[in-house]
Image (cartoon, rainbow, N blue to C red):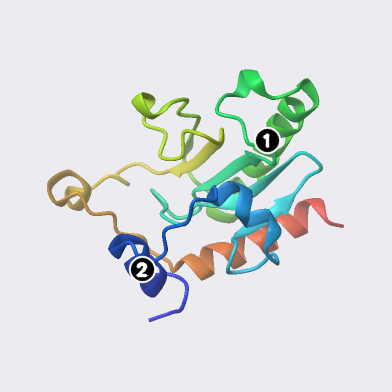
Amino acid sequence: MDHLWSPWRMKYIQGNEKSSQCVFCAAPHQEDGHENLIIARGERAYVILNRFPYTSGHIMVVPYDHQPSLSQLDEATRSEIIELLNRGLLVLQNVYKPEGFNVGANIGSVAGAGIAEHFHFHIVPRWAGDTNFMSTLAGTRVLPEALEDSFRRIREGWAALFEK
């Protein structure tokens, strides 16, 4: 299996790689690529592929500022986040041709935030029938492509649209 998906996930599940540092604060300090999964960087926020995606192409827009809520970010950061959300939607539409999107943020752990201390938006491409019996009965997600392939496709799609 590839070095990114299975072994990293097993270490995460088994608890061998626990860190007190926020994953969203740590990622920007790594070199961009398959290790940190950052698709694009802005001045105040960045776009990153979700390491445990709901569907292929599941990305997040994350501010560099470690704050638990959108309301605690300054206006310039909020504006850049919205622009990066829009660009993310355009890229995913070009790359995956989804029939729709879920875009949102879970603010606070009671609202479902897995990392409640660091605000972030999710962009999830959706297709008719993308929730099947595996999700419903077994609580298991089946993704049609490897994480590395998603990263490469989205990164190339971003470059084609915005890095000319």
Q: Relative to 57, does residue 5 appear above or below in the rendering?
A: below
Name the amino acid type tagged 1.
Answer: Asn
- Res 76 → quadrant: top right
Residue 7 rendering spot, x and y as whole percentages: 38, 74
Q: Residue at x 70, y 39 (%)?
A: 84
Nearest to N terminus: mark 1 or mark 2 = 2
Residue 10 rendering spot, x and y as whole percentages: 32, 68
Q: Residue furthest right?
A: 164
Frontmost residue, 16 versus 101: 16
Name the amino acid type tagged 2.
Answer: Lys
At mark 1, the secondary structure is helix
Residue 154 rendering spot, x and y as whole percentages: 61, 58
Q: Residues within 10 Å of mark 2 (few under 14, many from 20)?
A: few
On-image quarter of the N terminus? bottom left
Would residue 94 be seen by someone viewing this image from the given angle? Answer: no
Q: Residue at x 76, y 26 (%)?
A: 79
| Mark sitting on residue 11 | 2
At mark 2, the secondary structure is helix
The answer to whether residue 127 is left or right of residue 118 is left
On-image quarter of the C terminus? bottom right
Frontmost residue, 148 versus 32: 32
In this figure, which residue is indicated by the disc labeled 1?
86
